[in-house]
Amino acid sequence: MAQDNKQTQNQVQVQAQQQVQVQTLTPQQVMLVRLTEMPIEALQQRIENECLENPWLETAPSLDPSPEEEGSWAAEGPLSSERGEGGEASYDYRSEDDIPDYMLRPTYSKVVPENVEYGDTLTFYDQLKAQIADFDLTEREKMLLEYLIGELDGNGLLGKPLVQIIDEAEIYQGIETSEAEMQKVLGVLQQFEPAGVGARSLQECLLLQIKRDEKNPYQPLMQKVIEKYYDDFIHKRWERIQQHLKLSAIQTEELKREIKRLNPRPGSSIGEKSLVIGHQIMPDFIVDTDEDGHISMQLNGSTSALTISPDATEKLEAYSKLKSSQLTKAIQEDIRFTREYVERGQIFIDALAQRRESMIRTMKAIIKLQRPFFLEGDDTLLKPMKLEDVSALAGYDISTISRVCNSKYVQTPFGIYSLKHFFTHKAVQKDDAEMATAKQVMAAIQELIDAEDKKHPLSDEKLSALLKQKGYDIARRTIAKYREIMKIPIARMRK
């Protein structure tokens, strides 16, 4: 009984902490996270809109300095941006972990750039199938997973009951399986990107997305709404939901806004990648190198600096000199209006400055970690790099690094690349204890196959043995996985 009371007390404490987290989000933190995620074109439009809405915001000369001012350093030089005390960023991000990661779609312009990663023109089915290689599955599980992917509708959802899919697989494809086995495979599919793919209902689709967004402080409340009050949710009975969850009006509006950001058709977002064809991605960063091994970087575009109009300050100063008897109702309303928009404008200006700082320092960290690539432009020179690595070097929380890299692109002498291009996972360990990336392994495989005797092509087992001689400890099964990704047929088909 004592244990039950203790567990109940712990749950109450956790819920109370979550409520406090929701309430401690400041307007500037919310503004900062939204601006940080915006690519350059969306940011420029956002600034224009803000200037139109706020009568006391004025534009000043361009914020963007020359590449030399922004950052130029030698190949082995230090990172020019310094951290604050304790290794953290100089700005105050005390509750940044609690800020939700908003997902914003990239904005495109109208001309095709060179060497940009388009995400291929693969079909919805092919793009999901390509993710199978990211999981350690048996050949049978891969086969069942491919079949299951083929059963998804255009929204990325399963429109048929799992039992019906199993029956049709046996009748039309001769595939015998059990519900338990197919359920296990479905669990793998529901881990694919984007979140929500493989759901069997709208409710499950939303829950899959909510559960994956672990750092969102609204996650427990969102999950409770969809699990316990789903009928109220779909009928937009938010007053009842507010009463059930004992939320304030502000909390309810924020909760509603967060749930609206979920995608009821996750499959459609995969197809959006093909929209890049025929359109140019405006890079957010421009990186250049010289013959001496110096790398320079600057933010792209001419983002105008913003200031609060002196007229607003003069007006408030004039009003402050008035006696209380002179403060008519109209004057009081004008004071309130002016102060409100001045405060809003200052929050926007401060958030832009912090966004700029985090963008610069994050990009410099990426360049420092992947310096060989930026000097040579060779994908095989990319080193294993995770968000944690960039976070440690830039001095920002991982959530900030994730937002900076979301939908951002960099222009290099070798083409335009998504920032996500530089995040590579460890694939195999080499003899010298270094870790090789999947791209390095695939490059080594391609080199061996290009040099093979076409009358006696190399089997996967032979490729594995030859790679071990090169220092790559990689199994035959993994060779087959990489070969499939590279669209290279088996040995007997290469004769």
Image (cartoon, rainbow, N blue to C red):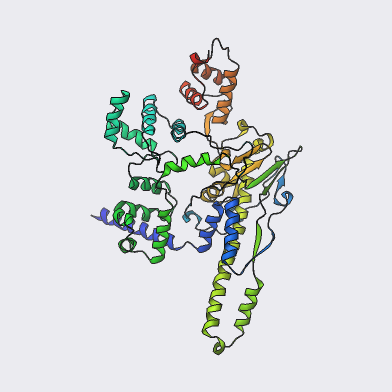
Front in this rendered view, residue 429 or 150: 150
* Residue farthest along the top direction in this orientation: 455
Q: Residue furthest bottom?
A: 325
> 328 above or below 21?
below
475 sits to left or right of 447: left
Percent position of residue 197, x then y: 40, 40
Taking depth in this image into account, of 266 and 223 the one nearest to the observer is: 266
Is the residue 4 above or below the residue 416 in the image?
A: below
Q: Residue at x 47, y 61 (%)?
A: 25
Q: Position of residue 91 (x, y in %)?
A: 59, 58
* 177, above or below 259, in the image: above
Q: Number of numbered discs present?
A: 0
The image quadrant that residue 78 belongs to is top right
Residue at point 53% right, 41% down?
275
| Rendered-image quadrant of the N terminus | bottom left
Question: Is any part of residue 176 visible from this angle?
Answer: no
Which residue is pictured at 33% across the width and 48% down the height? 203
Q: Position of residue 210 (x, y in %)?
A: 39, 49
**Residue 152 picture location, percent across and down:** 37, 36
Residue 384 shows up from this direction: yes
Question: Residue lying farthest left?
Answer: 1
